[in-house]
Amino acid sequence: MQRCECYYQPVAHNSSGSITSARGVDPATAAGLDAAAELLRALANPHRLAIVHELGAHSRCVHELVDALGVSQPLVSQHLRVLRSSHLVRAERRGREIAYSLGDQHVAHIVHDAIAHAAELRPARELPTTEEP
């Protein structure tokens, strides 16, 4: 997966030690933190992560998502509704079908990185916590 240009924007620390973007905006403002929490809340379900992961490649109709994920159509529609209400996914009518796509490729990057990070952590979590004699 290619990262968009904005992913590589340099960050700096201001005089108080907070991170700022190259544009001098502090992303850790109360509004920014609330928006980030809403974004993560909308993604906080394995089915929604899978939908975003599938839509990261290209737009898909509901029946294509149902086939790819192996879950019911009502379940996919319910999760698409959550993603649409959070403005993470958009819908476009194509004849009799509606094609869903990501509203912003940043979301695909977040999900891709979260999946990769979780895979890196998994072996550490599976190690026994006690030593065997």
Image (tube, rainbow, N blue to C red):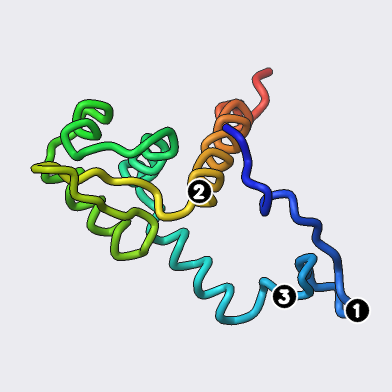
Q: Where, by quadrant of the figure, is residue 87 drawn?
A: bottom left
Q: Mark 2 points at which residue?
A: 105
Q: How many labels does the image show?
A: 3
Looking at the rendered structure, the secondary structure element under dot 2 is: helix
Residue at the far right in the pictured view = 15
Residue 102: x %, y % from top left:
39, 49
Residue at the far left in the pictured view = 96
- Asked whether the beta carbons under mark 2 and mark 3 sit within 8 Å of each other, the answer is no
Looking at the rendered structure, the secondary structure element under dot 3 is: loop
Say which amino acid is labelled 2. Answer: Gln
Q: Mark 3 points at which residue?
A: 26
What's the distance in space between the residues labelled 2 and 3, CA to CA? 22 Å
Residue 29 as seen in the image, left or right of residue 77 = right
Q: Which of marks 1 and 2 is nearer the N terminus?
A: 1
Residue 74 as seen in the image, left or right of residue 109 = left
Choose mark 2 or mark 3, whichever is in front: 2
Query: How many residues crowd mark 1 within 10 Å: few (<14), some (14–19), many (20+)?
Result: few
- Residue 123 higher or lower than 10, as above or below: above
Quadrant of the snapshot with the N terminus? top right
Say which amino acid is labelled 3. Answer: Asp
- Asked whether the beta carbons under mark 3 and mark 1 sit within 8 Å of each other, the answer is no
- Residue 97 higher or lower than 40, as above or below: above
Q: Name the residue under label 1.
A: 15
Looking at the rendered structure, the secondary structure element under dot 1 is: loop
Q: Which of 75 and 1 is in front in this view?
A: 1
Residue 32: x %, y % from top left:
58, 74
Query: Going 20% across and 26% down the picture, which residue do you hit?
Result: 67
Say which amino acid is labelled 1. Answer: Ser
Q: Which of marks 3 and 1 is nearer the N terminus?
A: 1
Residue at the far front in the pictured view = 95
